[in-house]
Amino acid sequence: MQKPNPDIMRAAIEVAEANQTPFGAALSMGNEIFVTAANQTKELFDPTAHAEIMAIRKLADHLKRTNLSGFTLYTTCEPCPMCMSAAIWAKVDTLFYGCSIPDIRVFTNQIDMRAEKLNTKSFHRVAIQGNVLKSECINLLKKFY
Ligand SMILES: [Zn+2]
């Protein structure tokens, strides 16, 4: 498994902060960031506008394809089942997240289904590693909840 690049997680943290949400995401290949996105559920009146979904939509639209294999998803918070499913459908190679679903649930509602659990039920396995810049990501939760 590749090693996380903290600069890319920092980009996800920055886009979250800029949008005043704890939820930010980035999609990269190697050390190159292709897109960043933040949760926009409130602005767009779209309950599905989670950061990871927005990032996947942006990159797929940019590349004009649905298969994002070769890409790595960075997200400040462990993906919810909707976002993890989207990452699987997009066939991303690797997922790095900051804080975990149990960490998020201290601050707000979150569906109690871990990304790894969904991954093991899937047709495509995403390599997953958490705790990337975890304390910075928890600080976002503290700041915006
Ligand atoms: Zn989500």
Image (spheres, helix red, strand yellow):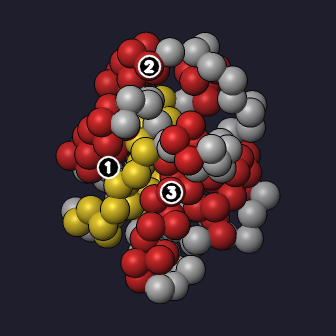
Q: Position of residue 26 (x, y in %)?
A: 37, 54
Identify which amino acid the numbered label 1 is placed on. Pro
Residue at the spot 48% in from the left edge and 75% down from the top edge: 60
Type of residue at label 3?
Met
The local crowd at label 2, few if under 14, some if 14 to 19, many if 20 or more residues have their Cα within 10 Å, is: few
- The Cα atoms of the two marked residues, 2 and 1, are separated by 25 Å
Q: Which residue is mark 1?
A: 4
Q: As drawn, is 64 to the left or to the right of 82?
A: left
SS at mark 2 in the image? helix
Give neighbour class at mark 1: few <14, some 14-19, many 20+ (Cα, 10 Å): many
The answer to which of marks 2 and 3 sits earlier in the sequence is 3
Residue 123 picture location, percent across and down: 74, 71
| SS at circle 3 | helix
Residue 129 visible from this viewpoint: no
Residue holding disc 3: 54
Give, as a three-letter code, the residue at label 2: Phe
Residue in the image at 32% along x and 32% along y: 17
Secondary element under disc 1, as helix, strand or loop, is loop
Location of residue 21 with respect to 92 vertically, above or below? above
Tell me the residue that label 2 is attached to. 144
